Image (cartoon, grey):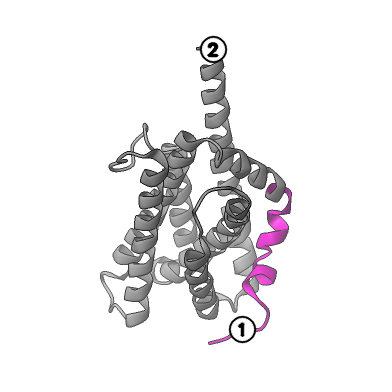
């Protein structure tokens, strides 16, 4: 089922996050010049993508896996692999798993995803949670990865998110077609996720500042 409008306008995502665009861009621009921290950030993205793929699997276990849901699951798992591989390329070493030593803001990232999933599921019900959680996640992924790709283009790194972004854009369109008719709910859930994202990003920035201060003290 198609809906009039588009996910960005109907969700209010870009409006809610306009004030965050410049700080996020500045943070990422600084981050890509610091291999160790950049690798940990990439590993955090790998963890979040893995959690997304796991959410799809668990949410569909009691139903019937369609071709579309299996494709979505496979692509999210591949995104987790992509970011893990890039993290290890940047770090020039293995980064097994996702622990405190090799993952940026590990606990805040876990809390971000867990609270978003639980909060949205409570509002829309377990039966509808897959579509709504996926839609809100895809909005955030496209927003963040779009800025990240712009930063990478301006950097000397041979890293591109173009193909990944194309898949996320496709997922966004699919989830919007599934759930986007309820504009009021979409805006409310997008605003809710933005509040959680703000806390995660604050934790990321605090971690980087703390590491920098410790390095100066040493």
Region of the chain picked out in magenta, as a range: 1-20
Q: Is residue 66 left or right of residue 136?
A: left
Above/below status of 180 relative to 105 = below
x, y percent for residue 144: 58, 55
Q: Do the residues under discs 1 and 2 have CB atoms within 8 angstroms?
A: no
Residue 17 magenta-highlighted:
yes
The residue shown at (57%, 52%) is: 152
Camera-side mark, 1 or 2:
2
Extreme residue toward the top, this view: 217
Q: Which residue sits at x=73%, y=49%? A: 19
SS under mark 2: helix
* C-alpha gap between disc 1 and disc 2: 56 Å
Q: Is residue 194 above or below residue 124?
A: above
Closer to us: 206 or 31: 31
The quadrant in which residue 96 appears is top left
In the foreground, 144 or 39 = 39
Residue 109 shown left or right of residue 2 in the figure = left
Query: Residue 178, how many percent across, how many down?
Result: 50, 79
Residue extending farthest bottom? 1
Residue 30, magenta (yes or no): no
**Magenta span dominant secondary structure:** helix
Mark 2, other Cα within 10 Å: few <14 / some 14–19 / many ≥20 = few
Task: Decide which of tag 1 and tag 2 comes sooner along the chain.
Answer: 1
The one nearer the camera, 160 or 129, is 160
Q: Quadrant of residue 52?
A: bottom left
Residue under label 2: 217
Residue at image mark 1: 3
């Amino acid at each position: 089922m198609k809906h009039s409008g588009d996910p960005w306008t109907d969700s209010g995502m870009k409006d809610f996050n306009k004030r965050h665009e410049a700080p996020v861009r500045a943070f990422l621009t600084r981050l890509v010049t610091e291999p160790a921290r950049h690798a940990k950030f990439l590993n955090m993205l790998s963890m979040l993508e893995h959690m997304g793929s796991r959410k799809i699997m668990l949410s569909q276990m009691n139903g019937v896996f369609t071709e579309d849901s299996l494709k979505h699951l496979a692509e999210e798992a591949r995104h987790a692999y992509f970011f893990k591989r890039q993290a290890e390329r940047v770090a020039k070493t293995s980064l097994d798993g996702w622990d405190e030593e090799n993952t940026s803001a590990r606990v805040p990232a876990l809390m971000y995803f867990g609270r978003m999933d639980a909060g949205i599921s409570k509002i829309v019900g377990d039966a509808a949670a897959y579509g709504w959680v996926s839609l809100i996640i895809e909005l955030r992924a496209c927003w963040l990865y779009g800025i990240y790709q712009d930063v990478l283009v301006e950097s000397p790194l041979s890293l591109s998110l173009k193909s990944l972004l194309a898949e996320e854009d496709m997922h966004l369109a699919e989830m919007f077609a599934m759930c986007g008719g309820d504009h009021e709910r979409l805006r409310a859930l997008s605003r809710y996720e933005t509040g959680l994202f703000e806390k995660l990003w604050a934790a990321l920035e605090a971690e980087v500042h703390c590491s920098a201060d410790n390095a100066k003290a040493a």
